[in-house]
């Protein structure tokens, strides 16, 4: 195995990053792929979704970031919870991830720490999914440097395209120093086909981003809220629902990229 790292990011909040990380991961796991989900958000929403609570997390991704290469082989097994989230392994996030900006002031090659720490783990997974926080900073840079594919969930909503400039500025800067430009695809989310504004934004996305937009469009579906409230997958609630079918189709498109 040589895992592909999927970085799920958008600096806009509430666009479906965590939902995409969890549900795409679930869909891949249901197809028998070995998946690891990393919760890089200090707010640890994906971690909570897996019913892992802050008080019971002694080792988290924060410790991975602070440790050095020699410590990673022993530390990863303490951080990773096998099968903790819908058939996926899970590395929990922690509020202390927000301190990294300060902790990393003196660290050398600080943007490449995550990529380096994941290098050995890649043998054990088909996909490693990184759920990113909604702001620029050292966590996002690490997630982008590690990415084999950046997936940008874009809410099909007025103003949705505005927040993107920040992300593309970051990409542009990184692309200048990385050996190859970061590959990316956008996925339209929370699409309501009855709303004219949604249809217009979708058209605009396809016009502006062309082939970089997945064919799959994720519809608005109330089952997602129910799934996160019940701490289960949308596939457990209704595997034939629009949302479930949407992410199954996205999983297919993602696998076809390699
Ligand atoms: N396709 C969808 N249909 C309906 N509700 C959705 C859909 N996708 C996500 N949601 C809901 O929208 C809210 C925000 O989604 P989510 O947490 O995935 O966004 P996020 O980008 O990770 O947010 P943040 O920037 O805070 O990390 C959640 O309550 C989620 O259940
Ligand atoms: Mg999130």
Image (cartoon, rainbow, N blue to C red):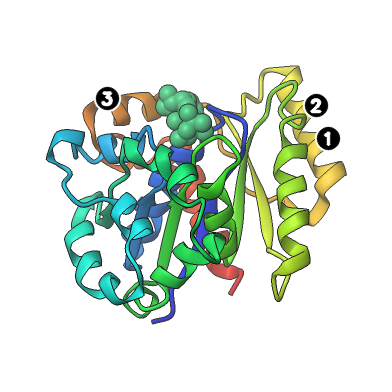
In the figure, is residue 167 to the left or right of 153?
A: right
Going by the picture, which residue comes out furthest to the front? 106
Quick one: SS at disc 3?
Answer: helix
Front-most of residues 99 and 257: 99
| Residue at (37, 32) in percent of width and height | 43
| Residue at (53, 65) in percent of width and height | 108
Front-most of residues 221 and 12: 12
Judged by depth in the image, the label closer to the viewer, 2 or 3, is 3
On the question of residue 41 being in view, the answer is no
Residues at circles 2 and 1 in contact by the CB criterion of under 8 Å: yes
Q: Which residue is mark 3?
A: 229
Labelled disc at residue 204: 1
x%, y% of residue 103? Answer: 42, 48
Q: CA distance from mark 2 to mark 3?
A: 31 Å
x%, y% of residue 249? Answer: 52, 52
Q: Considering only vertical position in the picture, is 116 above or below 154?
A: below
Front-most of residues 109 and 167: 109
Q: Residues within 10 Å of mark 1 (few under 14, many from 20)?
A: some
| Residue at (70, 76) in percent of width and height | 179
Quick one: SS at disc 1?
Answer: helix
Q: Which residue is mark 2?
A: 200
């Amino acid at each position: 195995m040589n895992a592909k790292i999927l970085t799920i990011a958008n600096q806009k909040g509430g666009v479906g990053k965590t939902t995409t990380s969890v549900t795409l991961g679930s869909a891949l796991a249901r197809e028998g792929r070995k998946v690891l989900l990393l919760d890089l958000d200090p707010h640890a929403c994906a971690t909570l979704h897996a019913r892992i609570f802050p008080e019971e997390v002694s080792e988290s991704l924060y410790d991975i970031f602070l440790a050095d290469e020699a410590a990673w082989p022993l530390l990863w097994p303490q951080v990773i919870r096998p099968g903790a989230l819908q058939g996926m392994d899970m590395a929990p996030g922690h509020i202390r991830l927000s301190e990294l900006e300060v902790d990393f002031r003196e660290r050398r090659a600080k943007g490449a720490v995550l990529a380096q720490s994941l290098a050995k783990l890649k043998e054990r997974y088909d996909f490693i999914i990184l759920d990113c926080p909604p702001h620029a900073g050292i966590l996002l840079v690490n997630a982008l440097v590690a990415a084999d594919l950046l997936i940008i969930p874009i809410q099909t909503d007025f103003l949705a395209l505005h927040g993107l400039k920040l992300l593309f500025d970051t990409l542009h800067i990184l692309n200048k120093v990385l050996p190859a430009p970061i590959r990316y695809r956008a996925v339209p989310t929370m699409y309501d086909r009855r709303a004219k504004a949604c249809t217009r934004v979708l058209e605009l996305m396809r016009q502006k981003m062309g082939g970089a937009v997945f064919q799959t469009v994720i519809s608005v579906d109330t089952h997602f809220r129910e799934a996160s409230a019940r701490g289960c997958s949308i596939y457990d609630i209704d595997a034939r629902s629009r949302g479930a079918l949407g992410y199954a189709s996205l999983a297919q498109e993602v696998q076809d990229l390699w």
